[in-house]
Image: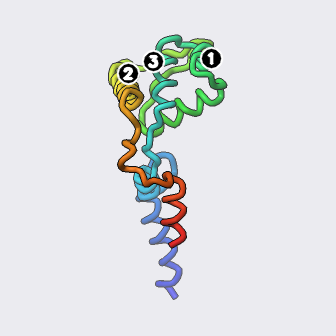
Amino acid sequence: MATISALPLRHAARTASLRQAGGQPAWLHALAHLLKNRRVSLLSLRAFVALMRYRHTGRAAAELGIQSQRLHYQLRSLESALDTELFRVCSPHWLPTPAAIRMLPRAQRVLAMWRDILDSLAQEPATPASVMPPYGPVAFWVRQATM
């Protein structure tokens, strides 16, 4: 009987040793870090650059044509993906952290590359007529899907 009653105590001691300061098990924190969504959208980068320019969410959101709640969401998702704080809120202005100041030129370069891609696609013809089947692309895909 002594071994049965000691089992929960050993388990509790082992679990307590694996806990972090916040009370969560260390393996749970590591798993959450691995499963975190690290995708970054161009809108979140544009929101970051606009907020760095204006330091005011209303003006930055107006430049992007979105609501300020959406701007907040984009910034928080960017901070989550980067796993760092980019701004400190000092109402009504947002103060950038040193990480945000270091990130600004790189974010601007990514957005400039995207604009270059869009400009190059606008200048080139989409698809040569010789590549497309004579009955059009829609009919081709419908036919392939039904075979």
Which residue has dot 3 on it? Answer: 96
Please state which amino acid type lies under the numbered disc 1. Answer: Ala
Q: Position of residue 117 (x, y in %)?
A: 36, 30
Which residue has dot 1 on it? Answer: 62
Which mark is drawn over residue 12?
Answer: none
Which residue sits furthest front? 134
Q: Residue at x 53, y 58 (%)?
A: 139
Foreground residue among 1 and 44: 44
Q: Is residue 79 above or below residue 102?
A: below
Of pointers 2 and 1, the one earlier in the residue sequence: 1
Looking at the rendered structure, the secondary structure element under dot 3 is strand
Q: Quadrant of residue 40?
A: top left
Q: Position of residue 84 (x, y in %)?
A: 42, 33
Q: Residue at x 64, y 24 (%)?
A: 68
Q: Quadrant of residue 96?
A: top left
Foreground residue among 15 and 54: 54
Which residue has dot 2 on it? Answer: 108
For marks 3 and 2, give the CA distance. Answer: 16 Å
Looking at the rendered structure, the secondary structure element under dot 1 is helix
Please state which amino acid type lies under the numbered disc 3. Answer: Pro
Residue neighbourhood size for the residue with mark 2, other residues' Cα within 10 Å, grouped as few (<14), some (14–19), many (≥20): some
101 relative to 136 in the view: left or right: left
For marks 2 and 1, give the CA distance. Answer: 19 Å
Residue 107 shows in the view? no
Of pointers 3 and 2, the one earlier in the residue sequence: 3
Of pointers 3 and 1, the one earlier in the residue sequence: 1
